[in-house]
Image (cartoon, grey):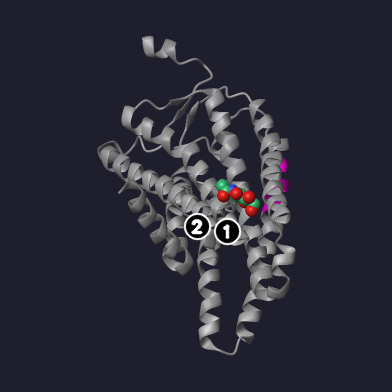
Amino acid sequence: MEIKNQTTVADFFLLGFSEHLRQQSLLFGLFLGMYLVTVLGNLFIILAIKFDLHLHNPMYFFLANLSFIETCFTCTITPKMLVNIQTQHHTISYTGCLVQMYFFMALVLLDDFLLAVIAYDRYVAICLPLHYSMIMQPQCCLLMVAASWLCSHLLAFPLTLLMAQFSFCASHSIPHFFCDPLSLLKLTCSDTHNFQVMMVIEAALSGVVPLTCVLVSYAHIIHTILKIPSAGGKHKVFSTCGSHLTVVTLFYGTLFLVYFQPSSSYSAKSGMVTSVIYTMVTPVLNPFIYSLRNRDMKGALWRFLSWGKCSTA
Ligand SMILES: *[C@@H]1O[C@H](CO)[C@@H](O)[C@H](O)[C@H]1NC(C)=O
């Protein structure tokens, strides 16, 4: 009775992995490990880029931004989920849920825009090398990053505002481990027509525009690479783009898997598994993909580590 009184009507329940009672400690350990590696790995990349003058160029500034976004992204989702698993207390306040949904959407969109900016940067570097320093001036880079931040928040805000007006009269149990917009949509008893129209328009805008930019950039890049006569030259160009292409594929691949299936066949279970991939697996892979595949980055990490050793000695 007392517990019932404590939870106000507005609270939601994140059911998440509560069915898997026996695996709770395993899941907790696994997710905690991934969370720590993500945060430390990405922070490491940001610091390595900041303190290494060799890496003070647009590509690495964008990578640092990407690492920063991935860090924010996991921080909006994983800590709450870890607490829920550990305490077996699945409530999240109504406001907390909306805030989490807002940042989730804004950061996914931001990731999306930034991947397009990185693709454009690679396009200029490889296809127009002589104009690179003229096109990618610091103000221009800053402008692109700022525009990405602005657009992603401008797109996430109205959806959150609409969601805030919905009433949740029946169940408050979200069969997910975070406040996923689609799962919330299934719970409401209000008319969701406007929301869905808005979501489709935004998904089309934020999907088509950046993805086109990525595809066109890479089509040009591949065309240019094929024209390079030496195998060594081809390999060098490809190794810098390969890591970005891997990240792009992971990002769009998982998003398409989750959000581009007919909503009637959207099952909470398979949705949750794919969500684990893009909320936890992709962010944890990013630092590895970039640092292990990239010689400059590896060098910077070593220099950063040995610099740490020198200054503590
Ligand atoms: C993000 O990119 C901008 C523009 O290149 C740069 O000035 C800024 O330092 C970057 N932010 C981070 C966290 O690295």
Residue 176 visible in rendering? no
Residue bounds of the magenta highlight: 197-206
Q: Is residue 190 left or right of residue 66?
A: right
- Residue 66: in sight, yes or no? yes
Check disc 1 and report its element: helix, strand or loop. loop
To which quarter of the image does residue 269 belong?
Answer: top left
Q: Which quarter of the image is occupied by the N terminus?
A: top left
User: How busy is the neighbourhood of tag 1: few (under 14 within 10 Å), some, or many (20 plus)?
Assistant: few
Q: Horizontal and vertical percent for residue 307? A: 39, 54
C-alpha span from label 1 to label 2 = 7 Å
**Depth order, front residue of 137/1:** 137
* Numbered circle sitting on residue 180: none
Residue holding disc 1: 56
User: Are discs 1 and 2 less than 8 Å apart at CB?
Assistant: yes
Q: Measured along the vertical axis of the image, is residue 117 above or below residue 160?
A: below
Residue 107 x %, y %? 58, 44
The residue depicted at 73 percent of the width and 53 percent of the height is: 139
- Relative horizontal placement of residue 165, taking residue 60 as reference (left or right): right
The residue under the point 48% across, 66% down is 296
